[in-house]
Amino acid sequence: MTMFTARMSLILAAFGLAATGASGQEAAPAAESSPAPPSKLETLAESCSAHKFETVVKTVTADGNTRGSRVKICGEPGQTEADWLVTLKDSMAKTESNQELTPAVRTQIIAALKAEIGRLEQSASAATTAAPQATIAISHDPVSVPEAPPEYASVPQLPAPLPRASTTRTSVASAPLVRPRLSIRCALPHESFAECRRLERETQLSIRADEDLADGISLRFLRGGDARAELDLGALQAGATLRERLPSRVCAGVLRGKVEVQVLSKGRVADTFGPLALYCGS
C-alpha cells in the first residue's frame, strides 16, 4: 500500500467508524462474529503514538439531526516535524480531489487541515527567528588582504628590472584572487531550495553559476578546522546549475557539529562561509 493510499484510507476509516449522532446514541452493534486481527492501519489509528491530527466534521441527516464524525490522521513513527507537515499537506491535496466525500465534509476537513498546517508553519518560523543561524551568501567584492607594516628604517635600492618574460610570469602569480560568482542554495528531499541555514545528512546542494566558471572551482567542507570533503564543480557556463548531495564524509562519525564551507579557486581559498549547524541524525 502506498503512503497516499494509507493516508486517505486512514481519513475515510476514521470518518466512518467514529461517527455518532448528536443525541449521543451509538450505532447498533454488529452481529456476533470472531474478531479479525487488526490491520497495521487500524493499529496505527488506535494508538496514534506518533504525530496526530484530529477534527470533528458535522453533517445534517435526512431527519434534520446534526451528526458529528471524528476524523483522525496519524503520522508514521519516527517522522520529523518537516515530514509530518508534508503528510498534512499531502492529505489536504488528496481530500480536495476525493469525490467520494460530500462538498460540505471536504470543506470542513480542508479548513481544519489548513488551520493546523498554518499553526505548524508559524511555530517553525518562530523557532527559526528565535535561533538564527549562519547563511551562505556570496559577496562579489574583491578579496582584500591587509599587509603588515615594514620593519626596516630605510627603503633599500630597487633591483634592476627583470626581462619581459619574467615580468609577465611574476604578474600572473601575484594577480589578486577574485571570488567566483556563484550562488549556493540548500534543500531537504521534498522541499524547495532556499538559503542554507543548516546542513543535514540528506541535504541537497544547488550551485548556480552567475558567470562562466572555468575548471578549478570547488567547495571544501571543514569540520573542527579539518577538511572532511571537497566537491569539484567543474566548468559551468553562466546560468547553469549543478545539484549534488552533501558529501557523506561530512557526517562521518558525528551526530551534531559545525561546518565551515570554503570556495576554492585553483586550490586557493577565495571565500569562506559559516560555521553552519550540522545535524547527521537519520
Image (cartoon, rainbow, N blue to C red):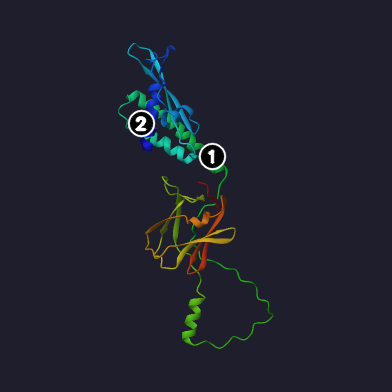
Check disc 1 and give the amino acid type. Ala
Could you say whether the residue bearing mark 1 is in a helix, strand or loop?
helix
Q: Is residue 57 above or below residue 242?
A: above
Residue 215 in the image: state x and y as whole percent: 42, 68
Place of residue 242 in the rendered image (x, y in percent of width and height, measured from the top left): 40, 58
* Residue 129 left/right relative to 213: right
The residue beneath circle 1 is: 126
**In front: 5, or 115?**
5
Between residues 260 and 174, which one lies in front from this camera angle? 260
Residue at numbered disc 2 = 95
Residue located at (58% from left, 87% from top): 159
Expressed as whole percent of the image width and height from the top left, the position of residue 90 reads 39, 36
Q: Quadrant of residue 87?
A: top left
- Residue occupying image coordinates x 38% and y 12%: 65
User: Residue lying farthest front?
Assistant: 34
- Residue 259: percent from the left, percent from the top? 55, 55
| 1 or 2: tag closer to the N-terminus | 2
| Amino acid carrying mark 2 in the image | Thr
Which image quadrant for residue 130? Answer: top right
Does residue 107 appear to the left or right of 177 in the view shown?
left
Nearer the observer, 152 or 41:
41
